[in-house]
Amino acid sequence: MTRDDRKVLASTLAGTTIEWYDFFIYAQAAGLVFGPLFLAPVNEQAPGLATLISLATIGISFLFRPLGAIIAGRYGDRLGRKRMLVLTLLLMGVATTLIGLLPTYETIGVAAPVALILLRVLQGFSAGGEWGGAALLSVEHAPRERRGWWGAFPQIGVPIGLILATGVLWIMSTVTTPEQFQAWGWRVPFLLSLTLIIIGYLVRRAVEESPVFKELQQRTKTSSAPLRDLFRSNTKNVVLTALIFVANNAAGYLLIAYFISYGTTTLGLPRPSVLLATVVGSVGWLVFTLYGGVLSDRIGRVRTFQIGYALVFVWMIPLFLLMETRSIWLFTVAIIVLTIGLGLSYGPMSAMYAEMFPVSVRYSGVAIGYALGAILGGAFAPTIAEALVQSTGSALSVGAYIMVLCVISLAAVTAVKEPKGTDLGLTHQPIA
């Protein structure tokens, strides 16, 4: 691996890690403190409803991810992957830092939750454009036989971002009292984002544009309307990429946001212990995501996805049975086993999605499919999970909900013709 290759992988990994750190800090804080701080009147009357509304604000941002994907995809297919990745990184950093400075309901009244939601929308817009560009920058630089491995690097930005976000929250909840954490401790992780953004910007600025995109610029005129061109001949693949992602994103957001709230509020487990369990689970997610990328280079993208989703499906009911024992050790084991299936159904995604679209509309197709899948999957998964538990009195209903989504995603990935090894240049052949 050359020095330039290492720079590419470092850039995609650093950028996605920072983007998802910012995104996840919000998701976790929503389950821990946003109800009392930004929805004080509701929290006084009905704490459960305040938690439900706080978790719902996570999903609001997902509704704006397709807009971010459309705009980033349009200009990423016309101007290049690198420029859009720098812009999305800066947008996310600004929004996250401002959340850390935001006054609460007690200070500015109803303007507080309104401003919080607007900043969350900006986070969603940025996230909509980030993943597709990072995935393509990595995969389009990769040797044909190692695309799964290279493509796994932007993927592990998700668990690393989760580790950082949860780790910082765990440290703050450990070194502060509950009163201090709610007063100011929760702000520290948001403000730390500013330092991370500066580092990510410097790393990303030094990377060369994708060689595949350079070839497109040199040999043909880039499309002035990539979105129109995308849906003219690739609508089926956009739908498939969205449905393939649904179950992974929903189950992932249970780990990212819901399990923390469920463990502390419903099960009564200590907050630091639940946060630490999430960190341990995130390490497992990282390892199995990398392995999923490697495995897909050996046995194919479709087969790796199928194995991953089958594992998630069979584990959902045992997962909640273990959690309901209220043992922090079994709670942690339940999460770790879940991450095996999560990793295997996430590691191959960058490579497979890139191989499903021609270069002229690839950024648009990958980004929009991913964003739509996130809306259908993770956007309101924590809210749906909380509502199911409150209405049925059993977390097993949440397991059944994820199992249904696994069936949908399994059917979608099975409908894809194995794309491993497809040419990513101008001679790309459609995958259906």
Image (cartoon, grey):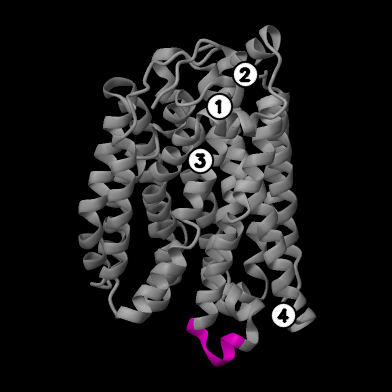
* Distance from Cα at disc 3 to Cα at disc 4: 37 Å
Question: Would you name the residue on which mark 2 appears?
Answer: 210
* Distance from Cα at disc 3 to Cα at disc 1: 14 Å
**Which range is magenta?**
42-48
Q: Which quadrant is home to the C terminus?
A: top left
Q: Residues within 10 Å of mark 4 (few under 14, many from 20)?
A: some
Q: Is residue 294 left or right of residue 427?
A: left
Question: Would you name the residue on which mark 3 appears?
Answer: 369
Residue under the image location 23 percent in, 72 percent down: 325
Question: Would you name the residue on which mark 1 appears?
Answer: 136
Q: What element carries label 2?
A: loop
Question: Would you name the residue on which mark 4 appears?
Answer: 105
Amino acid type, label 1: Leu
- Do the residues under discs 2 and 4 have CB atoms within 8 angstroms? no
Residue 403 in view here: yes
- Do the residues under discs 2 and 1 have CB atoms within 8 angstroms? yes
Instruction: Decide: is 73 above or below 213.
Output: below
As for residue 44 lying within the magenta part, the answer is yes
Q: Earlier in the sequence, mark 3 or mark 2?
A: 2
Amino acid type, label 3: Gly
- Do the residues under discs 3 and 1 have CB atoms within 8 angstroms? no
Q: Earlier in the sequence, mark 2 or mark 4?
A: 4
Mark 2 or 4: in front is: 2
Amino acid type, label 4: Tyr
Q: How crowded is mark 3: few (under 14 residues within 10 Å), some or many (20 or more)?
A: many
342 or 175: which is nearer to us? 342
As for residue 239 lying within the magenta part, the answer is no
Residue 172 in view here: no
Q: Earlier in the sequence, mark 2 or mark 1?
A: 1
* Distance from Cα at disc 3 to Cα at disc 2: 21 Å
